[in-house]
Image (cartoon, helix red, strand yellow):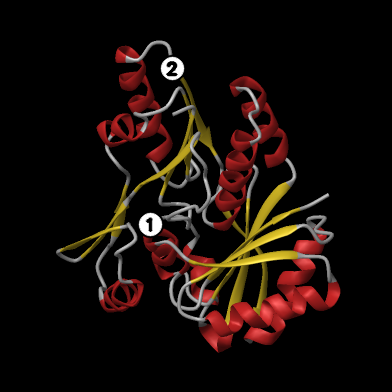
Amino acid sequence: MKWKIVTDSGSDIRQIDNLGDDVAFEVVPLMINIANKVYIDDENIDLEDLINASEKEKTATSSACPAPSAYAQALEGADNVICFTISSNLSGSYNSASLGRDMFLESNPGKNVFVFDTFTAGSEMNLLIRKAVELAKEGVEFDELVQQLKDYHTKTNVNFVLESVDNLVKNGRVSKIVGQMIGLLDIRLIGKRSDDGQIELAHKSRGIKRALNTLLKAMEENKYQGGKIEISYNTSIEVAHTLTDKIKAEFPSADINLIKMSGLCTYYAQRNGMIIGFEHA
């Protein structure tokens, strides 16, 4: 096998069709710990059960990244490997993947492996993965592919629409002050990622209709002009369709893909959360 694309479950993608003979794809799942139950974030995870358990649990809950050995095993099987991880400022997954790469290269010194700290999560990761697959299928050489991915990442971004941030507050990802605002009086948080991959408050808006309008304005502030979009959702596909229609009304050429959210992203985005990754100018 010439190429393998690996990702942790900070991405929502679980399989990619029509890869051809030269490209493989594999997901290394993170784990979510709630009370005495461990949820493995693979294709079998029950998102509704995860959300319900998270909402009922009053004590601290947490997520855990894969072990380096899990990454080392996932890197097997190809001459060239690109491994995507959720932001290193949100998880230890990047450090674990880097250790796994070192373990793998000790016994496979002739292989090429690049661990990509995406400084993001969810649907923006999806865009990067799809770009890597596209370039690999085109036959781009390893170093050039890595550089093109880095260049592409300068033209992608992400926004979040959240109606609850309890788990983000519990895990220190969002301040308690922001957490106290969200959920009161039907207020939604429109979030963004910082340059170093942390979650920041961009806007707050009352009601989902206003929140979607504010979201679209935030995307335009980030130079969205009608490129590719990935919308990941967990419990509310209807709102995802409403957002799709709203974007299409303003940007008819927009290439929009809706995808079910991963367990890890659901854990942090919580009920009715959405993550919107997009290309920009």
Q: Position of residue 244 (x, y in %)?
A: 69, 75
Front-lying residue, 16 or 88: 16
Q: Amino acid at mark 2?
A: Lys
Residue at 29%, 64% (x, y): give it: 44
What residue is rendered at 30% in x and 79% in y? 52
Q: Position of residue 25 (x, y in %)?
A: 44, 43
Judging depth in this view, the residue of 105 and 263 nearest the camera is: 105
Q: CA distance from mark 2 to mark 1?
A: 37 Å
Percent x, y for residue 152? 71, 39
> Are the residues at dot 2 and dot 1 in contact (C-beta closer than 8 Å)?
no
Q: Residue furthest left?
A: 36
Label 2 SS: loop
262 to 151, vertically: above or below = below
Amino acid type, residue under disc 1 in the picture: Asn
Relative to 103, is 189 above or below? below
Left or right, residue 6 beside residue 145 = left
Residue 267, by quadrant, is bottom left
Image position of 274 with respect to 193: above or below:
below
Q: Residue 143 is drawn in which quadrant?
A: top right
Residue density around tag 2, few if under 14, some if 14–19, many if 20 or more, within 10 Å = some
- Left or right: 37 as drawn, with respect to 246: left
- Which label was assigned to residue 171? 1
Q: Quadrant of the N terminus?
A: top left
> In terms of depth relative to the viewer, which is nearer, 173 or 280?
280
Give the residue number, with chain letter if any, for mark 2. 111
Q: Position of residue 111 (x, y in %)?
A: 43, 17
Q: Can the viewer see residue 196?
A: no
**Label 1 Cα crowd, 10 Å radius (few <14 / some 14-19 / many 20+):** some
Q: Residue at x 62, y 28 (%)?
A: 146
Q: Earlier in the sequence, mark 2 or mark 1?
A: 2
Q: Secondary structure at mark 1?
A: loop
